[in-house]
Image (spheres, rainbow, N blue to C red):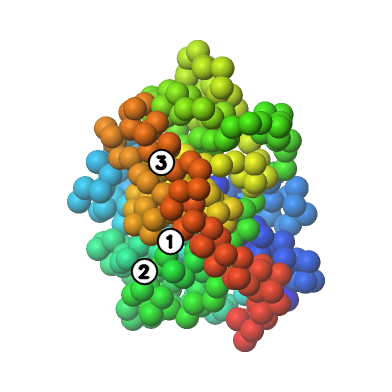
Amino acid sequence: MRIVFSSLSGHGHLYPLIPLARAARAHGHDVLFATGDPFRGTIEELGLRFAAVGVPIGAGFAAASGGSSTRPEPGSAEWLRLVSLVFGAELPRRYLADLRPVLAEFKPDLVVHEAGNHGAGLAAREAGIPGVCHGFGRQSPANYAGFDPALRSVAADAGIELPEGDLRTLGNPFLDIFPASLQPAEFLESVARFPLRPVPFAPSGALPPEAVAERSRPLVYLTLGTGFGDAAVLRSAVDGLAALEVDVLVAAGPSVQAGALGELPPNVSVHEWVPQAELLEHVDLVVHHGGSGTTLAALGAGLPQLFLPQGADQFGNAETITTAGGGEQLLGAEVTAESVRTAAAALLGDSPHRRVARRVAAEIAEMPSPERVAERLPDFAR
């Protein structure tokens, strides 16, 4: 069977699909991965076929905002309107156009599109190819008010019929990598959901020596991910964590240079990138932005989390895990060295938060593996 996997051009959208794509290939399926050209090397190193489609998410925001570099306040009405235009119109329109020739040439039997890439779902529907929606994290309780009208307008322009009701999955079966206990009940009731165990993926690499060294005190992992780095927030977190009897390992990401953090305390080390999937088994606490990938990886490892959300779906993830008792969150001006120190201290050791995290980890471990779900993919193509 021929299968196209397609994601938006972003780490948090691409990486969750890779375990199933690899499992599908291992089952003998002919797999092509269609995403942004910056990820060509990642995909081809895995031995998968690659097709460059779409534009960076930032380009979608630039187009929707008329080229303005000024972004509305996250959570504001103007911000929600902009997000609806980006993910409901600008990106779907481009991915639909770019995937048409890919599907025509490859002639897949199935298209697996991630939940942020509605353009790939539209392209499959237009070509008469069965589609499956692959989640990358928690679904918002409801779509942004302007999302459905924007997407329906793109579909109408292309002559594509869409199902009535909620368009979060385009009416396709939904492969859900988020534990059901943390998904909104109304979403679970509205889709044909198939659980899929989240398997953290990152390009291979060596762990920093300090991550695997013998130690007599906890190791705290601090990151703001790949897209929302902020040197001031990282510095406040570093100062707060360094005041504890812990070692701190920082992944600064591509948007913050290590030098921007200034002189570091002796119990802190900073790296541009670390193999997060391998690192977490050595960690006692994760302090991070709340991106879906890091949130799920920490949940799967049974680790408490301190959230410092900066944008996108991070606020929803932080609120969900905090409400469930698996962590704490600090928002905006609340992020100070003292508040980080206090919150982190409460999360270390055998805290109630750790017990909640371990319970969710057990739930995740019971979800079907990518290998088991790959066996079922032909059923979705019928």
Q: Establish if 273 lies above or below 150.
A: above
Decide which of tag 1 and tag 2 comes sooner along the chain.
1
As shown in the figure, which amino acid type bears the numbered disc 1? Arg
As shown in the figure, which amino acid type bears the numbered disc 2? Pro
Q: Position of residue 263 (x, y in %)?
A: 50, 13
Q: Position of residue 3 (x, y in %)?
A: 67, 70
From the image, state whether disc 2 or disc 3 is nearer to you.
3
Q: Residues within 10 Å of mark 1 (few under 14, many from 20)?
A: many
Tell me the residue that label 1 is attached to. Answer: 138
Q: Position of residue 148 (x, y in %)?
A: 31, 67
Tell me the residue that label 2 is attached to. Answer: 184
Q: Is residue 53 at all visible to an observer of this figure?
A: no
* Residue 380 falls left or right of residue 312: right
Kindly indicate whether the residue at mark 3 contacts the one at mark 2 (C-beta within 8 angstroms).
no
Decide which of tag 2 and tag 3 comes sooner along the chain.
2
From the image, state whether disc 3 or disc 1 is nearer to you.
3
Q: Establish if 101 lies above or below 203.
A: below
* Residue 6 falls left or right of residue 164: right
Q: Is residue 373 at all visible to an observer of this figure?
A: yes
SS for callout 1: loop
Which residue is painted at 30% across and 66% down in the image?
142
Tell me the residue that label 3 is attached to. Answer: 346
SS for callout 2: loop
Which residue is painted at 51% across and 16% down in the image?
264
Which quadrant is the N terminus positioned in? bottom right
Which residue is painted at 77% across and 54% down in the image?
47
SS for callout 3: helix
Decide which of tag 3 and tag 1 comes sooner along the chain.
1
As shown in the figure, which amino acid type bears the numbered disc 3? Ala
Question: In the orientation shown, which residue stands out farthest toward the bottom?
Answer: 382
* Residue 228 falls left or right of residue 366: left
